Image (spheres, rainbow, N blue to C red):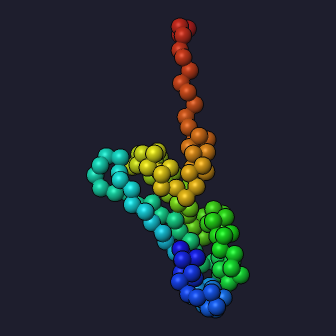
Amino acid sequence: TVDRIIDIYPSGQQAQIRMQLSMALQGVVSQILLKRRDNKGRACAMEILVGTPAVRNLIREGKTHELPSIIQTGGDAGMQTLEDSLHALYKKNLITREAAVGAANSPESLERRFAMAAPAPTPTLGRRRF
């Protein structure tokens, strides 16, 4: 979203726009609506970026490619990755795994997260001894 705002302007003005945006930005919320598993409307998945000093500095320096790592580690500041939100919606049984992976910025990362959180297989029970 930040890059889209900056890219609207001609390349000769982008450094000035980065400076202005870095000073004015309070936060960015990007959202996507996904069909609910129960077919009763949509569920909202969000990515949240907060205008912390680190975020402002990256924007000013033109290092917006580093923002995803700031979002990943910025939970204490109220930041959230899209994958965090998708995973939470899936855990609440609001959306399917396929819908979550299809909407992710990083499907591989979300799949790894699902694999780590997968329940252990139920052992086959033989004869019980009491």
Which residue is painted at 55% across and 58% down in the image? 105
Q: State the quadrant of the C terminus.
A: top right
One can see residue 74 in this view? no
Which residue is painted at 46% across and 45% down in the image? 97
Which residue is painted at 61% across and 45% down in the image? 112
Q: Answer left or right for 45 relative to 129.
A: left
One can see residue 8 in this view? yes
**How many callouts does the rendering have?**
0
Counting from the top left corner in percent of width and height, residue 123 is at 56, 21
Which residue is painted at 45% across and 60% down in the image? 45
Counting from the top left corner in percent of width and height, residue 19 is at 64, 89
Residue nearest the observer in this picture, 123 or 47: 47
Q: Within the image, what quadrant is residue 120 found in?
A: top right
Residue 83 versus residue 77 in the image, above or below: above
Counting from the top left corner in percent of width and height, residue 125 is at 53, 14
Counting from the top left corner in percent of width and height, residue 118 is at 56, 37
Q: Answer left or right for 57 relative to 85.
A: right
Residue 48 versus residue 107 in the image, above or below: below
Residue nearest the observer in this picture, 23 or 78: 23
Q: Within the image, what quadrant is residue 69 found in?
A: bottom right
Q: Within the image, what quadrant is residue 55 found in?
A: bottom right
